[in-house]
Amino acid sequence: MGNSQASPASASSSRFVMASRAFPKQELDGLRELFASLAAQSRTGGRAISRPVFLEYYQVRGRLGDRLFQLVAKESGGSDGVTFEDLIISKATYGRGTRDEVDEFIYQLCDVTGDGALTRSDLESVLASVHETVFAIKKEAVEVSNNRPFEEFLNSAVFSKDVEGVSGKSMSLSDFRNWCTLLPSLRKFLGNLLMPPDSGLSYSCNSLYAYISSIFISIGAVLMEYNVHDISCHAFDDFISFVGRPGFEVPLLHYPENICTDTLLLNKEYAWHIGGGFSQHEVQEWKLLYHSSLHGQSFNTFLGKVTNGDAQTVLIVKDTEGSIYGGYASQPWERHSDFYGDMKTFLFKCYPQASIFRPTGANKNLQWCAVNFSSENIPNGIGFGGQPHHFGLFLSANFDQGHSFTCSTFTSPPLSKTNRFRPEVIECWGIQMRGAQDEKLELVKGTVLERFKEDRNMLKMVGLANASD
């Protein structure tokens, strides 16, 4: 009475039908348009997207890009490339699936050798691809420069799984999930590889990107007419940055020209790591407010510098043992006799391990800033989490000593090698939110768009026209 077992082709077709239901019609049509464009470039007679075109479009470099192509093309066997069915099934699973489904996909993705064992060697290849993709650094250049984030991210990994035929331990799915929890920037990156590179430009082709660029150039000219300076040259870059893929953004670091960059604790890799704990609009521009070698190791100077700056700050400490760690303060550094702050606050480690520790809700002992108190129960200084005299991280008011203990506020271990430490370098960076310049841009945006009425339909594709209504 017929074959009771579905053939691979019919099973794939069934999965495609189910996956298609995950997308609204307009989005599915957009994906069909994207596929047609990329398949045409692939010279496959419109049947599939070739590997070179796929990798060039999604801009994922190194072995991770090859593995992504392999997984996406798996449904059809990948002989010709990525079919439309492959694309829809993968995007539905990877972008619209349950947390478990997405984690399983990413776990397989990081197994770049495809041998069923996620080893340290696999993670090294993954991190090399991250550097090449996010920072435009070739793997060979990273190895020559002995760039440390490889070591720091790998040092946070745990390998507890035995796999037959594989020497040494490999990483279990549970190990992998825990690793991604400690490294949210990496999790965001791995979770958004199939998002269009221009994100807000969605499924548009490169010609639309160029078209929108020309519109912004014209907008810049009008901005100058309205005396809005220092925006026109950055408007398009800021727009693209705003709609960029999560996990691909690196904060732009601003610091005085007279400071030697070798003395800065915060490099772009650390900024990318710490930025994983932020929302997208907070990973824009960070400004150096205080540096102990530049401004002196003084608590009063520190408070003077940071209270005149942005409310949200990143505090980074390097101790005399060489460890680098710190905390994100979501509230201003102001005099309090007790803990304050909100659940956005977190602690982090950068070296020798890279990790982020978010609040658990166990208590509200998030941020501490005590100045000129005489009570022994109110230690003067700044800190995060824990209890007075037993903080998750604390710097004394003299800035000459500190401590870090296991902390239930963030479920964090001691950040320093020993509970008591001496700071060698202290930095504080202000998170610059979109503010006054954006308000000026909003004032003239409506006028600008009126001058490009014929382009409104095109602008709606990136959501800009609707924003002005």
Image (tube, rainbow, N blue to C red):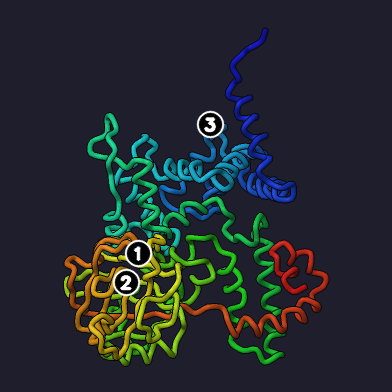
Q: Amino acid at mark 2?
A: Gly
Foreground label between 2 and 3: 2
The residue at which mark 3 appears reads as 77
User: Could you tell me if residue 50 is visible in this image?
Assistant: no
Marks 1 and 2, how far apart in space?
15 Å
SS for callout 3: loop
Residue lying at the far right of the rendered structure: 454
**153 is higher (above) or lower (below) than 368:** above
Foreground label between 3 and 1: 1
SS for callout 2: strand
Q: Position of residue 285 (x, y in %)?
A: 48, 77
Query: Which residue appears at 44% of the width and 63% of the height?
Result: 276
Circle 1 crowding by C-alpha within 10 Å: few under 14, some 14–19, many from 20: many
Circle 3 crowding by C-alpha within 10 Å: few under 14, some 14–19, many from 20: some
Instruction: Mark 1 and mark 2 in contact? Answer it, CB < 8 Å.
Output: no
The residue at which mark 2 appears reads as 326
Instruction: Mark 2 and mark 3 in contact? Answer it, CB < 8 Å.
Output: no
Of residues 290 and 250, which is closer to you in this image? 290
Q: Is residue 349 left or right of residue 403?
A: right
User: Could you tell me if residue 89 is visible in this image?
Assistant: yes
Q: Amino acid at mark 3?
A: Gly
Of residues 272 and 208, which is closer to you in this image? 272
The residue at which mark 1 appears reads as 409
